[in-house]
Amino acid sequence: MKIVLASDHGGFELKNEIKKILEELEKTGVPVNEAGEKIDKIEDIGAYSEDSVDYPEYGRKCAEAVVSGQFDRGIVVCGTGIGISIAANKVHGARCALCTSVHMAEMTRRHNDANLLALGGRTTEAPLAVEIVKTWLATAFEGGRHQRRVDLLDQM
């Protein structure tokens, strides 16, 4: 599984915490889901400091990297996760979900086949964010009746 990460200055610190965990999973080769997928590539496309930047650019770049097929999933982080998720969802084919709980992460994969996850660097503590990410990576899309709805989203 190839994962791309992006943040603005408000999400920089949390993005780096998530990146460390993902790099550990990549290094150990532990499967991240029941299908046995392992993380084989992680790319951080910025921001690279806490200097002020514009979150729409990072949300767009991350979503484009996923929708193009270059990456399987993307994780975006800004101060609250709201702005960067809106930006990511402007890219046709992006299904970015802002999750504030493990349950939301599970459901957005099961029912919405979310290909991007948004988190708030100033609103979500790192231990919870890590559990959200792990659950989001581990959960499969159920398909079935949900596929019709995802297809409708993708037609918009």
Image (cartoon, rainbow, N blue to C red):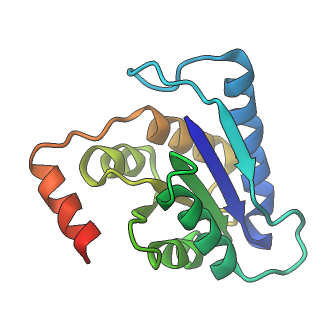
Q: Residue at x 48, y 37 (%)?
A: 137
Q: Residue at x 17, y 51 (%)?
A: 147
Classify 113 as above or below 27: below
100 or 93: which is nearer to us? Answer: 93
Residue 39 image offset from top left, x and y in percent:
61, 30
Determine the image quadrant of residue 42: top right
Q: Position of residue 79 (x, y in %)?
A: 68, 71
Number of labels in the image equals 0
Q: Give the residue at the far left of this rendering.
A: 145
- Quarter holding the N terminus is top right
Is 27 rendered above or below residue 93?
A: above
Residue 100 visible (yes or no): no
- Given residues 72 and 16, the one toward you in this image is 72
Residue 44's x, y, as percent? 75, 53
Can you give x and y, in whole percent of width and height, for residue 122 in the image? Answer: 69, 66
Q: Residue, x 64% and y 30% (percent of image)?
A: 40
- Work out which quarter of the rendered image holds the C terminus and state it: bottom left
Q: Is residue 102 visible?
A: yes
Instruction: Indicate the quadrant where residue 57 lies.
Output: bottom right
Q: Residue at x 90, y 76 (%)?
A: 51
Foreground residue among 108 and 41: 41
Toward which corner of the image does residue 138 lie, by quadrant? top left
